[in-house]
Structure formats: C-alpha cells, structure tokens
Amino acid sequence: MKALLTVTACTLLFAACGKPAPTESVESLMANPERLKDVRAQCKADHAKVGDARCTMAAEAARRRFMGSGTPYTPAPPVMPPPAPKN
C-alpha cells in the first residue's frame, strides 16, 4: 500500500512538472492575425521562454499566410523566334 502511494505521488509530481502542450494550431494562428503577430513578437523577444513548438507554429502560419497554398512554379514555355525570311 505504501509503495502504491509513493508511485502515485511520483507520477503526479512528474505530470505536474511537464510543459503544457501548445493549445494553438497553425490554422488557428492563420485565422487570427493579431494573435499571430503577438506570438511572433514573443518569440522574437524570448524564444527560449515561448518554446520551439509555438515559435515553429507561428513561423509556419506566417509562411502559409504569405505564400498561400504554395502553387508550384511552372515557367512559361520558351518563345520561339519566327523563322528567318528566305531570300
């Protein structure tokens, strides 16, 4: 019984020490530009405090807002010069 209590207490202690998972997603940041601006400013001020996961999500949301769906580059076909006149 004492061992069970000790294991339970240790489990709760370790669970309380973990960082909470980010509640925001890339899509939610894309939909709310003011929140995106705030998160990017926080990342710029103190990246270590905000965390890699949230800063990466903010960067991805900013990239998607700027680039859109990311249409692939398709160059125009080369323009052929007209045939030379025959003399």
Image (cartoon, grey):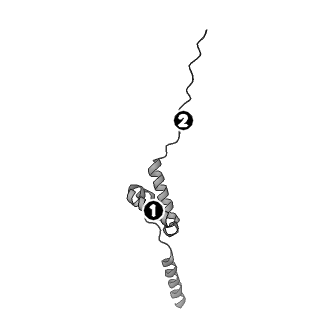
Residue 75 numbered mark, or none:
2
Task: Please provide percent x and percent y for residue 86.
Answer: 60, 10
The quadrant of the picture occupied by the C terminus is top right
> Could you tell me how many numbered marks the image carries?
2
Relative to 41, residue 20 above or below: below
Task: Please provide percent x and percent y for residue 66.
Answer: 45, 49
Task: Please provide percent x and percent y for residue 1.
Answer: 52, 90
Label 2 CA crowd tier, 10 Å (few <14, some 14–19, many 20+):
few
Name the element at disc 2: loop
Q: Give the residue number, with chain letter if any, for mark 1.
A: 41
Task: Please provide percent x and percent y for residue 33.
Answer: 39, 56
Label 1 CA crowd tier, 10 Å (few <14, some 14–19, many 20+):
some
Under mark 1, the amino acid is Ala
Q: Is residue 87 left or right of residue 16?
A: right
Under mark 2, the amino acid is Pro
Quadrant of the rendered structure where residue 78 is? Answer: top right
